[in-house]
Amino acid sequence: MPMPSRFPRWFGCLAAGVVISLSPVRGSASGAIDFDTAWQRLDAANPALRAQRLELEQARAGVSEARARRLPTLGISGNVTRLPQDYGLSLDPLRSALAPVFPEIAAQIPHEYVVQPRQFSLAAAKAVWPLYAGGRIRAGEVAALAQEAASDAAVEDERGELAIRERDLHQLLDGALEPREIRDQQVVSLGL
């Protein structure tokens, strides 16, 4: 049966990350990296912080979406219809009624008037600008802004916790990696 640990599980992962980030870097003059470089690497590679940043991006997109509800929307539609034949109206009864009285006019009237051609198309455009929506647009904006603020605070909180853990581990490792003779010299110089 494994013994319970005094440290949470993430502490070991973080310690390993700090050790790896503090390992010698090829091409550096001193062979080690400083705290700022280690912090930048940890800040960029931390999965929890990356998830918080993605939530913040999502919240910012929600704010943009909520603000876009105030803008007009434009809809365009169109269709083409093809009928089996032209639909028309026969004008022969009118021609035969006018022919005895007005023969010139009756001669100018066609035999059939096409009401609907066999193929026709329709197109429509519609613009809607919400002037008043009962406060729903503003409420959506406020909710989105609150979500953005909460996500931003969560990112900063996670960064702060990560910085504290990384600083503590960095100090711990600095003390552990420091050569024994330098520590002995410090003890002698302090008079301890």
Image (cartoon, rainbow, N blue to C red):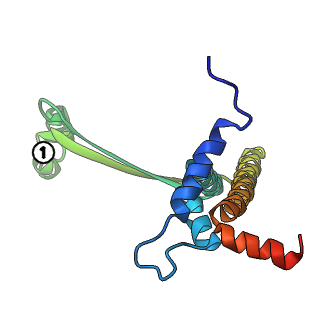
* Closer-to-camera residue (10/115): 10
Q: Is residue 94 left or right of residue 44?
A: left
Q: Is residue 29 above or below residue 161?
A: below
Is any part of residue 122 visible from this angle?
yes
Image location of residue 159, percent across then percent down: 69, 58
Name, please, the residue furthest toward the top. 1
* Closer-to-camera residue (151/101): 151
Disc 1: which residue? 110
- Residue at point 21%, 43% (across, down): 120
Which quadrant of the structure image shows residue 19?
bottom right
Image location of residue 161, percent across then percent down: 74, 53
Image location of residue 184, percent across then percent down: 75, 70
* Closer-to-camera residue (99/87): 87
Task: Classify 10 Å Cα crowding around label 1: few (below 14), some (14-19), many (20 and above).
Answer: few
Name, please, the residue furthest toward the bottom. 29
Q: Is residue 6 above or below residue 104?
A: above
Image location of residue 181, percent across then percent down: 67, 72
Q: Is residue 84 left or right of residue 38?
A: left
- Residue at point 17%, 47% (across, down): 102
